[in-house]
Image (cartoon, helix red, strand yellow):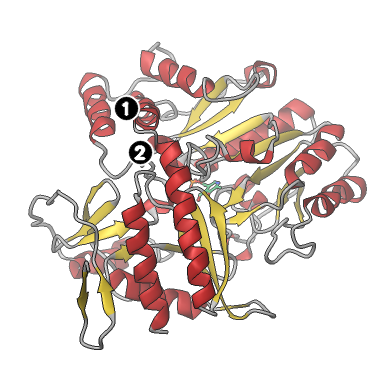
Amino acid sequence: AAAELENNNAVVPKMPPFDYTPPPYSGPSGDEILKKRSEFLSPSLFHFYKKPLNITDGKMQYLFDEEGRRYLDAFAGIATVCCGHCHPEVIDAIINQTKRLQHSTVVYLNHTIADFAEALASKMPGDLKVVFFTNSGTEANELAMMIARLYTGCNDIISLRNSYHGNAAGTMGATAQSNWKFNIIQAGVHHAQNPDPYRGIFGSDGEKYAKDVQEIIDYGTSGQVAGFISEAIQGVGGVVELAAGYLPAAYKSIKKAGGLCIADEVQSGFARIGSHFWGFESQDVMPDIVTMAKGIGNGIPLGAVITTPEIAEVLTRRSYFNTFGGNPVCTAGGLAVLKVIEKERLQENACVVGSYLKDRLKALQKKHEIIGDVRGRGLMLGVELVSDHQLKTPAKAEVSHVMDQMKEMGVLVGKGGFYGNVFRITPPLCFTKEDSDFFVDVMDLALSKL
Ligand code: PLP
């Protein structure tokens, strides 16, 4: 009933109503920005759409362009805006703190950094309670790997093929996708077989993949390692859920070799996977170090490393600090994010709405031959397109085409994966069932037009 007819008789789904109109925009047009961007910004920057979008406003699960057109945002700035764009309580916390004290350094006391650290620690299992703040996920992982190396006195780090851990020298070494790597030195980093149930060589047998970790230790190191780093669900890699049983077995080998296990929660952290607050909890493992960023600040630059008091002690061996890490504005924002997640029961929402959305996507898979796989947890879902099911031939151009079509109908979604053929669906955690219906109906129509 809530649909209108297009000229070619296809029914264009209607976006759920939303009671917000952004203030009129009088800034430069998208074309003008594009011109400046090509002259003054790095040529490495890319955009998703044939005609790039000029996004001027955001409110909860919606973004608005220069003409005030509303889009359902199913990417959330790469799984970053967890409470919703410009959530009033997060904004208030940031503004109030900015008015009072915009910056301070660690040489003075300020309560926001301590309050947020305490709140973060309360969300952690075991003895994980010492926090070090950074500005990004890359910095958090750089620090985590350095801590593991300092603590163990070893250099070797094992990460997973297809993982993404950041773009500085050390983390780019741990990242294992050629398109995200430059010709960098990655001494001491080993990449293990990826326990990818869809494309991996051992299907969904997690323990078989974990044997590769033991083999790397046996044949590629002295038998002692610094650590192991992995995402619980690979985000940039195309929303790949690690095969069940993998992490417990891999952690066992690493701990036996004296290494520390690092859980990279930069994308999966802060309630996104719904069933658990942290991604690693869904794999029933206990990491030694957890890193986070993106969602913890709802879009403000904020990252963190959390570990045990015993391990954190290694950082007292030298002077180590970060100018902006733990900035009071960012930590006040982070604290507000945690409060909103609890108050609005966003973890529960991610669980309920996420499984509803996944069921609807699975049903779509039955209708469209091109969908090779639907996977993920909570509101971290992936849809992989392949032109041949047997060969799993990546349908990359089709993903781009469908994204453009979806944008025209008012839906924004991410893409990724090693072959660029996976839709990444990581909306703000306030996404509703109505949003899910609209999203799937739009994707359905765009796929039908291929
Ligand atoms: N780790 C994971 C799992 C990520 O997805 C990312 C970024 O996408 C990073 C680390 C790096 O975070 P940042 O871009 O904030 O440096």
Q: What amino acid is found at the position of numbered circle 2 in the picture?
A: Ile
Residues packed near mark 2 inside 10 Å, few (<14), some (14 to 19) or many (20 plus): many
Front residue of 11/188: it is 11
Q: Position of residue 291 (x, y in %)?
A: 57, 35
Q: Which mark is residue 329?
A: 1
Residue 49 seen by the camera: no
- Snapshot quadrant of residue 298: top left
191 vs 295, left or right, is right
Q: Quadrant of the C terminus?
A: bottom left
Q: Which mark is residue 300?
A: 2
Q: Residue at x 27, y 78 (%)?
A: 11
Precedes in sequence: disc 1 or disc 2: 2
Q: Residue at x 48, y 80 (%)?
A: 397
Front residue of 191/84: it is 84
Q: Residue at x 66, y 34 (%)?
A: 146
Q: Is residue 31 above or below residue 247?
A: below
Q: Position of residue 165 (x, y in %)?
A: 59, 48
Q: Secondary structure at mark 1?
A: helix
Q: What amino acid is found at the position of numbered circle 1 in the picture?
A: Val
Residue located farthest toward the bottom when viewing the structure as drawn: 8
